[in-house]
Image (tube, rainbow, N blue to C red):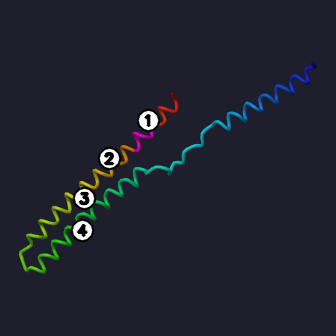
């Protein structure tokens, strides 16, 4: 074998190794694949405001229909606040579980 043949075979081998590495390499995850912090914050704000708004609307409607003092307005606004907080906590827990599952999958992949 001549030096040229060895160099050519070595170049072919390196090309095959590079191709195999590229094929095995997992695709990069997109930055927008998961919920970003800003999106999560806006989602939670909207959930809170929605709960308050719905509670306020129901309370105001009942007070108007029944002609009462704003007891239902206060009661349902507080219930809307509680519902909004509950939904916010559920959303935070959901995102936390997704992140934990993602971290566990990466850990398992490395092992």
Q: Is residue 6 above or below residue 62?
A: above
Q: Position of residue 1 (x, y in %)?
A: 92, 18
> Quick check: marks 2 and 3 in contact, CB under 8 Å?
no
Q: Main secondary structure of the magenta part?
A: helix
Residue at the far left in the pictured view: 69
Q: Helix, strand, or loop for circle 4?
A: helix
The span from disc 1 to disc 2 (Cα, nearest Å) is 16 Å
For the residue pair 93 and 52, the one nearer the viewer reads as 93
Q: Quadrant of residue 99?
A: top left
- Label 2 vs 3, first from the N-terminus: 3
Alpha-carbon distance for marks 2 and 3? 14 Å
How far apart, in angstroms, are the residues tagged by discs 4 and 2? 23 Å
Q: x, y (%) of residue 50?
A: 28, 65
- Residue 19: image x %, image y %? 73, 36
- Asked if residue 44 lies left or right of residue 67, the reply is right
Q: Please, is residue 48 above or below residue 7 in the view?
A: below
Disc number placed over residue 53 in the picture, else none: 4
Looking at the image, which residue is at 68% across and 37% down?
Answer: 22
Residue that numbered label 1 is attached to: 104
Image vertical order of residue 29 relative to residue 54, above or below: above
Q: Name the residue beneath numbered marker 2.
A: 93
**Residue highlighted by disc 3:** 84
Q: CA distance from mark 4 to mark 3?
A: 10 Å
9 displayed left or right of 72: right
Give the magenta-colored segment's residue range: 98-104
């Amino acid at each position: 074998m001549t030096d040229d043949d060895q160099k050519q075979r070595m170049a072919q081998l390196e090309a095959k190794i590079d191709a195999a590495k590229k094929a095995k390499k997992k695709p990069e995850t997109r930055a927008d694949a998961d919920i970003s912090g800003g999106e999560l914050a806006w989602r939670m704000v909207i959930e809170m405001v929605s709960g308050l708004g719905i509670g306020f609307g129901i309370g105001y409607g009942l007070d108007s229909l029944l002609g009462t003092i704003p007891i239902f307005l206060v009661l349902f606004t507080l219930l809307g606040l509680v519902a909004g907080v509950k939904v916010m906590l559920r959303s935070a827990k959901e995102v936390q579980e997704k992140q934990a599952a993602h971290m566990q999958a990466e850990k398992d992949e490395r092992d």
